[in-house]
Amino acid sequence: MALSKDELKAAILEKAMTAPKPQLYVKDFYACDPDAKPRDVKNAANDLVKEGKMDFWSSGSTTMYAAKGRAKDEEHR
């Protein structure tokens, strides 16, 4: 059974905070709820960005997600 939207958002945020890499693809969040549809996972991740809990991060060729404050600026390494 799929998680509720709030439970899914909590699971995504937890993964974003604890993942070894600070930037994650939306597909990395699919494992948070294997029963959820990919579109539902993407919508939940986008909601977290709108709420200010996560940020979009771009490498220039792809857009990824990162927990607020965890994204690294590749140009300043």
Image (cartoon, rainbow, N blue to C red):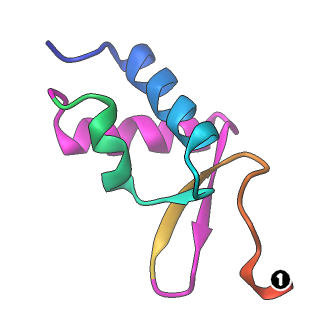
Q: Quadrant of residue 51?
A: top right
Q: What residue is at 51 percent from the left and 22 percent from the top?
A: 10
Q: What residue is at 85 percent from the left and 83 percent from the top?
A: 76
The magenta stretch spans residue 46: yes
Residue 68 located left or right of residue 15? right
The residue most toward the front is: 20
Span of residues in magenta: 35-61
The magenta stretch spans residue 26: no
Residue 69 located left or right of residue 22? right
Residue 8 x/y as whole percent: 38, 23
Image position of 74 with respect to 11: above or below: below
Q: Element type at marker 1?
A: loop
Judging by the rendered image, the residue that carries numbered circle 1 is 77
* Amino acid at dot 1: Arg
Residue 67 located left or right of residue 46? right
**Neighbour tally class for label 1: few under 14, some 14-19, many 20 plus, Cα within 10 Å:** few
Residue 1 x/y as whole percent: 14, 12
Q: What residue is at 48 percent from the left and 70 percent from the top?
A: 63
